Image (cartoon, rainbow, N blue to C red):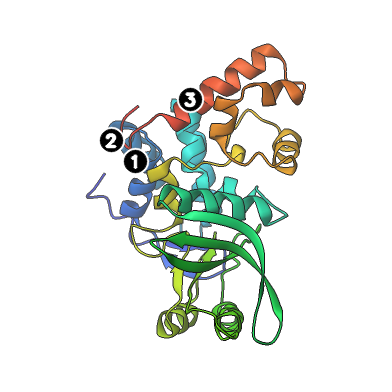
């Protein structure tokens, strides 16, 4: 499979742009699902047989997801992490909570939705972080639709807000973060890095992006379950339950959703497999 010439195919991204198909990129995503090398290579081989110029990334995802699901729903669920984060909407608050939990795993003290006085006006800040006597502000930009990236206007606006807060009388100098579940455009990255903002997107910084941190700390949203209905997921999110680990810790949450004992056992078993894994092993 490694010698197959799949790089000749042009695929269409969600943004409408064309890109060269990367077998290695798909292989890495498959392995990150927890599937072993043999399963990953088999799925990659089957997907590669159905490639054609102009195939969409969504179609490639669907084919790979269905093939992985045949080897185990928990593999497919982890593979679909980007998609299930989109499903946390339409409100951005569940995503803000998920991001906060990731920072907690990085030993930050986290406060959500703080109203802070700036030099000119007051500002609502998604997260305020404290660590080693240093304070940081975090603004989360959640998109519920694929293909919507954060352009330069996002860090421009957020930087101006953080500057207003830091310039108020007697205020110390704060650091700032912008976090998104999609990607930053090139000019957004250039501007953010130039003014000293820390940027975190789905795959930026390389190997330390949102997807990497979620896997590292096993911070998976409730929407990762393939056995909960869309209505059940939304109900749990609206009640403030964001993480899959909450269901494992408090199984009674499923009873409150009037989920039968048989279904509850299946859901818990699936989530246990999703949570307790190492990449490439299961």
> Tag 2 or tag 1, which sits nearer the N-term?
1
The quadrant of the image that shows the C terminus is top left
What residue is drawn where x is 45% and y is 70%?
A: 199
Q: Name the secondary structure under disc 2.
A: helix
> Residue shown at 52%/43% (left/top)?
80
Spatial separation of the CA atoms under disc 3 and disc 1:
18 Å
| Disc ID at residue 37 | 2
Screen quadrant of the N terminus: top left
Checking the image for residue 31, the label placed there is: 1
Residues tagged 1 and 2 counted as in contact (Cβ below 8 A): yes
Residue depicted at x 31% and y 38%: 41
| Identity of the residue furthest to the left in this view | 3
- Mark 3 = which residue? 272
Describe the element under mark 1 as helix, strand or loop: helix
Res 243 quadrant in image: top right
| Mark 3 or mark 1: whose residue is earlier in sequence | 1
Q: Are marks 3 and 2 in contact (CB under 8 Å)?
A: no
Mark before the other along the chain sequence, 3 or 2: 2
């Amino acid at each position: 499979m490694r010698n197959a010439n799949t790089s000749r195919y042009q695929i269409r991204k969600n943004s409408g742009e064309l890109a060269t198909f990367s077998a290695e990129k798909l292989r890495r995503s498959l392995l990150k699902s927890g599937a072993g090398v043999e399963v990953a290579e088999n799925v990659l081989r089957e997907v590669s047989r159905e490639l054609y110029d102009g195939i969409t990334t969504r179609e490639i995802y669907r084919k790979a997801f269905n093939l992985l699901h045949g080897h185990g729903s928990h593999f497919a669920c982890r593979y679909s992490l980007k998609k299930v984060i989109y499903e946390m909407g339409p409100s951005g608050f569940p995503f803000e909570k998920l991001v906060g939990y990731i920072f907690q795993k990085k030993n930050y003290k986290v406060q959500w939705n703080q109203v802070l006085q700036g030099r000119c006006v007051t500002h609502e800040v998604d997260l305020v972080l404290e660590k080693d006597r240093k304070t940081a502000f975090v603004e989360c930009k959640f998109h519920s639709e694929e293909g919507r990236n954060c352009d330069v206007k996002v860090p421009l606006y957020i930087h101006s807000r953080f500057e207003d807060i830091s310039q108020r009388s007697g205020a110390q100098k704060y650091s700032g973060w912008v976090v998104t579940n999609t990607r930053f455009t090139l000019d957004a990255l250039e501007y953010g890095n130039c003014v000293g903002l820390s940027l975190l997107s789905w795959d930026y910084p390389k190997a330390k992006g949102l997807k990497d941190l979620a896997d590292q700390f096993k911070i998976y949203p409730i929407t990762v379950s393939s056995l909960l209905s869309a209505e059940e997921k939304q109900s749990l999110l609206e009640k403030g339950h964001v993480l899959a680990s909450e269901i494992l810790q408090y199984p009674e949450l499923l009873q409150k959703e009037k989920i039968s004992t048989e279904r509850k056992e299946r859901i818990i078993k699936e989530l246990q497999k999703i949570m307790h894994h190492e990449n490439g092993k299961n």
